[in-house]
């Protein structure tokens, strides 16, 4: 497989995973549970605007990843194990970035505003780390010689 397509499989999955997990965060924690907004250091109005921008970011990443995936399919160059590795890497990287950088370092928001926040932080960051490890294991397995199972299959063309 061309090196370009190996990277494109990984980046397509990464963007999709990052966008998808950001979408889940936005839909569940921002909108359904209403535990926080993306930017909680201002008024509710600003918080809602920041949620809208965050939501747009998640969709741009998801759709960008899917456009790259469609291009791979068109070229018969989809490598699903590599793509899924990218999905888990993207989801885990976003979750850890959100939990460590945005929650703790930048203090844009917290998962929930309660007295014992540690439980929420630990679950959030462990989930992110677990997703990241799953992605690393999938990608590492491919690099260690199990490529045959994961190589893209030639799409059978319908004869007319």
Image (tube, rainbow, N blue to C red):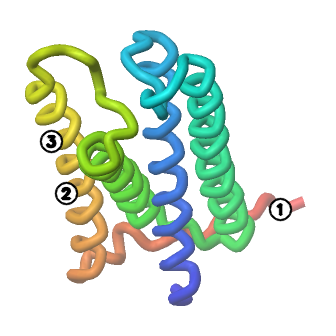
**In this view, which residue lies farthest toward the bottom?**
2
User: Residue at label 3?
Assistant: 126
Residue 29 at what x, y percent from top left? 40, 21
Q: Earlier in the sequence, mark 3 or mark 2?
A: 3
Q: Is residue 158 above or below residue 2?
A: above
**In this view, which residue lies farthest toward the top?**
33
**SS class of the residue under badge 1?**
loop
**In this view, which residue lies farthest toward the front?**
42
Report the disc number at residue 133: 2
Asked if the residue under mark 2 is in contact with the one under mark 3, i.e. CB atoms within 8 Å, the reply is no
Q: Earlier in the sequence, mark 1 or mark 3?
A: 3
- Looking at the image, can residue 24 be seen? no
How crowded pointer 3 is (Cα within 10 Å; few <14, some 14-19, many 20+) is rated as some
User: Residue at label 1?
Assistant: 159
In the picture, the quarter occupied by the C terminus is bottom right
Q: Earlier in the sequence, mark 2 or mark 1?
A: 2
Q: Is residue 110 above or below residue 11?
A: above
Q: Nearer the viewer, residue 34 or 137?
A: 34
**In this view, which residue lies farthest toward the right?**
160
Q: Nearer the viewer, residue 159 or 136?
A: 136
In this image, 154 relative to 20: left or right? right
């Amino acid at each position: 497989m061309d090196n370009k397509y190996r990277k494109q499989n990984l980046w397509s999955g990464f963007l999709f995973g990052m966008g998808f997990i950001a979408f889940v965060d936005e839909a569940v924690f921002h909108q359904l549970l209403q535990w926080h907004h993306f930017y909680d250091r201002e008024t509710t109005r600003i918080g809602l605007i920041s949620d809208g921008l965050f939501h747009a970011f998640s969709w741009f990443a998801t759709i960008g990843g899917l456009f790259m995936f469609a291009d791979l399919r068109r070229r018969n160059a989809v490598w699903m194990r590599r793509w899924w590795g990218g999905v888990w890497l993207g989801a885990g990287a976003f979750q850890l970035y959100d939990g460590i950088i945005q929650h703790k370092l930048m203090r844009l928001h917290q998962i929930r505003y309660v007295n014992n926040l540690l439980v929420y932080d630990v679950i959030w960051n462990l989930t992110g780390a677990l997703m990241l490890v799953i992605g690393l294991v999938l990608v590492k397995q491919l690099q260690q010689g199990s490529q045959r199972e994961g190589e893209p299959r030639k799409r059978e063309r319908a004869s007319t």
